Image: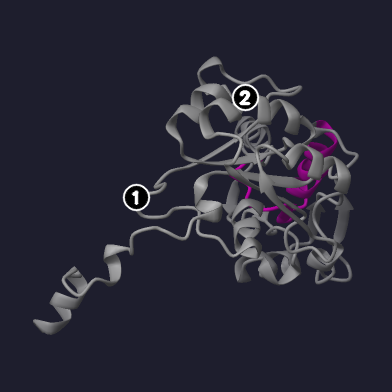
Amino acid sequence: MKVYIIGAGPGDPELITIKGARLVETCPVVLYTGSLVPTAVIESAKKDAIVLDSSNMTLDDILEVILQAKEKNQDVARVHTGDPSIFGSTAEQMRRFDSLNIEYEIVPGVSSFTAAAAVLGKELTLPEVSQTVIITRAEGRTPMPEKERLEILAQSGATLTLFLSVLHIRKIVEQLTPFYGAECPVAVVQRATWPEQKILTGTLGDISERVKAEKISSTAIIFVGPVLDCRDFADSRLYSADFSHGFRKAKRNR
């Protein structure tokens, strides 16, 4: 018996991996986060599979289902949104699995932040503009480690990607403006790749009002950084005529 912790992707049911989809189709028990994972992702489950929405279940409730599956030697597809490794609330589950000697495997998925960048049509790293992407969140009910406060991270000038933070957009603007400037471009993507997807673009100077006007209050990714509206950047060396690739040399030397 094994628990497969599956990243279902950002919303578009075609963005789950082939492996993830196959496991949903074949596992006799499927647990999915119904508030975030579209039903189209789990509709391929076997007709006789036990399919449960974990949105209103506690961790103990989830473990009870998994322990029952273990007694029957049944594999479990534990389906999460996006990629399980980023704000996936999977670590506490795996800790319990370890203590109960339950075997598990993580099946990665397309993160909502990469999907949001895709629908924006943006590369988050540009030569000589920003080569670093910081994935973080604003402080809310979950406190932030002291050294990871936004004011500290902002000193890098890197591209910032904020999960779970749109309710704190005014505070974010206050914290970041001294470092990025009021004219720094910002993008907010709600429910990237879902039919009801929303995209807002603006600056630190006006994004709060735009978010308020569009009534965006959840499931949104916030990007901050000059890469969002930069046209004057150096070409990558990757395609330069004098850039050598080891594998190309190896091929020529065969």
243 versus 222 height, above or below: below
- 102 and 136: which one is in front? 136
Give the alpha-carbon distance from disc 2 to disc 1, as whole Å.
25 Å
* Displayed quadrant of residue 7: bottom right
Mark 2 residue crowding within 10 angstroms, few (<14) / some (14–19) / many (20+): some
Residue 227 coordinates in the image, percent (x, y): 50, 51
Q: Which residues are magenta?
A: 60-87
Residue 61 coordinates in the image, percent (x, y): 85, 36
* Label whose residue precedes the other's in the sequence (2 or 1): 1
- 11 and 31: which one is in front? 11
Residue 49 coordinates in the image, percent (x, y): 85, 63
- 114 and 29: which one is in front? 114
Would you name the residue on which mark 2 appears?
Answer: 175
- 25 and 121: which one is in front? 121
Residue 192 seen from this side: yes
Residue 221 belongs to the span the image colors magenta: no
Question: What's the residue at 62%, 71% (across, down)?
Answer: 18
Q: Secondary structure at mark 2?
A: helix
Tell me which amino acid carries mark 2. Gln
On residue 236, the disc is: none
2 versus 178 height, above or below: below
Tell me which amino acid carries mark 1. Glu
225 versus 124 height, above or below: above
Residue 154 coordinates in the image, percent (x, y): 51, 30
Q: Seen from this angle, which residue lies furthest top?
A: 146
Would you name the residue on which mark 1 appears?
Answer: 128
